[in-house]
Structure formats: C-alpha cells, structure tokens
Image (spheres, helix red, strand yellow):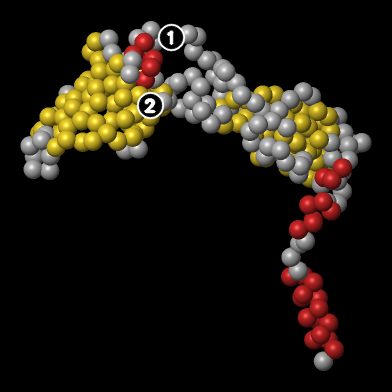
Amino acid sequence: PQQWIAAAEIAEDIAAPPSATDFWDQGESSSEEEDDPQGGSDVNIYKPLRFKNNGAYDVTVLPASYTPDSSVVAVGMSNASTVVFRDSSPTAYLDLPMGTYTFCYYWDLGTDIDNDGYVDYAHKNTGSVTLSEASPAKVISAQVVTLNPGNMNNPNGKCGENVTPPSGNALSLTTAELSNQGQHTYSVSGYYGEETFEPEIESYSFKFTVDGVCVIDEDGEDCLGKTAPNVYSDNDDTITFTESGWVSEGYLEFYDGVSYPYKFTGTLIQ
C-alpha cells in the first residue's frame, strides 16, 4: 500500500547517517540557555575558533584565561581542549562562549632533556583572541589561531605546571654519576654463580635523588641508598658508577633457596 511506502521513506530519512562533509557544512553558531536570576532565561552565543599548528610537535590546546563578553550570562571558563596535529590544515577547533581568551598549548618533547629519568613536556601561551557577535558562526570561516611548538632547552612542563628547571648540578653529582644520569644504553656482561653471561645490549634509567639512586628498567624501579661517592647499596646489592658505566654486584637467591654471588658490568654505549 502507498502509506507503507511513504512510512518506509520517512524511516530511511531518519536513519540516514550524517555526511563526512558535515564538518565543513556547519550551520550557525550554537547557543546554550542559561537561567536568568531575575526570572526567564537568556541565551549565550557560542562561536567556533580554529587552530593551526606550524611547529614541530603535536599539541593539546586549552583556554588559559577568559574575560566574558558583556552579553554572556554567568558562565565560567570552558574546560574544553583539543589536539592539533603538526603540519595539518586548521580543522581542529573549539566552540566557545563569546569573550576574550588566551590559550595554553603543551607538547611531549620526546626526550629527557634535563636527565631526570622522565620524558619532558613544554608549553606556551598565545596572545589574546576575541570572539564577538561579529565573529564568523561557521567553522569553515572561523578565525584561526596559529601555534608554534618547538624544542626547549629548559622544559617548563604541561600547562599549569610551570616546572622550574634545576640550576646547574643541584645534587652535586660526581662526573661518574652525571655520566649515567637519565636513560642510557649499555653493553652488559658478567656472571651469576658459576654461569657466565656474554655481553647484551640493555637500556637502564638512573634517577639520582638526595637520598640515593633509583634504577628503572623494563621490570620496574629499585632504589638504593648512597653509602659513598659513586657507591649505592641496599641489603643485597651494591652498584658503583664510573665515567664509562657501572658495576653491580651482590647476591641473588636461586629457586633452590640458595643465594649465589653475581657481578655485572654495564658499559655506556649512548
């Protein structure tokens, strides 16, 4: 019957998924209704703002400060954020209440620049950006904020962290300790009981603290106290640092319950 065909066509229209081009076919800016303390309600107008990344790293960007437009009704700073990939067209955007903003963006530097055993982050702030009634309401024509992440010799952490880089050799580490601080690759060889081990390439990270050193590898973290310059130990193990690597020795308990002596030498590769 004709009415069944018409009903089917209506159902098909309802179920039809949005087109991939909908991003560039955005309608007018969105709005959000707020309660008016005097009764009734007002409408806050949201405007899109696009971001372009001209730097060397992917970044996460988020509002750092916000001064509402005079027409905005009792709204705090948005906690929205978005990832902006490097060398990409400005498709990343945020939909925000009208007003004046600054933005913070941060990125993973991918290296341990300060040799503390952890990958470092850096951040920057943008200049002021204003979204007003005159700002474009469609994403395709929205204002673009350009971001420029780059290398930093003194990483300052993610947004809001403001990490203060250590000045010089704050822990008064020896040359041998400084040579091994952070993550390095070593050629490791030695013996355990009566078994000898040929050199193998292994990666270790050494994090020196006021109290000692923490050794970090694929199995986890083990911390030892300082007993002398370049020498750290706990009840069973002692590690001595040299400018070319380290020597670790002590006793390890075998599955039969007997402890056997061991000694391994790690020679710095990089």
Looking at this view, is 169 or 225 the one in front? 169
What residue is shown at x 36% (from left), y 32% (from top)? Answer: 203
In the displayed image of the protein, which residue is found farthest to the bottom? 1
Residue 111 placement (x, y as % from top left): 51, 28
Identify which amino acid the numbered label 1 is placed on.
Ala
Q: Kindly tell me whether residue 205 is visible in this rendering.
A: no
State the residue at coordinates (69%, 30%). Answer: 55
Counting residues from the start of the chain, the first of labels 1 and 2 encountered is 1
Q: Which amino acid type is shown beneath numbered disc 2?
A: Ile
Q: Is residue 62 left or right of residue 145?
A: left
Q: Quadrant of the C terminus?
A: top left
- Quadrant in which residue 247 is drawn: top left
Q: Which mark is residue 170?
A: 1
* Quarter of the image that includes the N terminus: bottom right
Q: Secondary structure at mark 2?
A: loop
Helix, strand or loop at label 1? It is: loop
Question: Residue 102, how many percent across, how many down?
Answer: 74, 26
Residue where numbered disc 2 is placed: 269
In which quadrant of the rendered view does residue 136 lie?
top right
In the rendering, at what x and y percent does residue 38 appear?
Answer: 82, 37
Is 122 or 104 nearer to us in this picture? 122
- From the viewer's side, name the closer residue of 162 and 112: 112
* One can see residue 187 in this view: yes
Q: Which mark is residue 186?
A: none
Q: Residues within 10 Å of mark 2 (few under 14, many from 20)?
A: few
Q: Nearer the viewer, mark 1 or mark 2?
A: 2
**Cα distance between the residues tagged 1 and 2:** 26 Å
Q: Given contact means CB atoms under 8 Å apart, are the residues at marks 1 and 2 in contact?
A: no
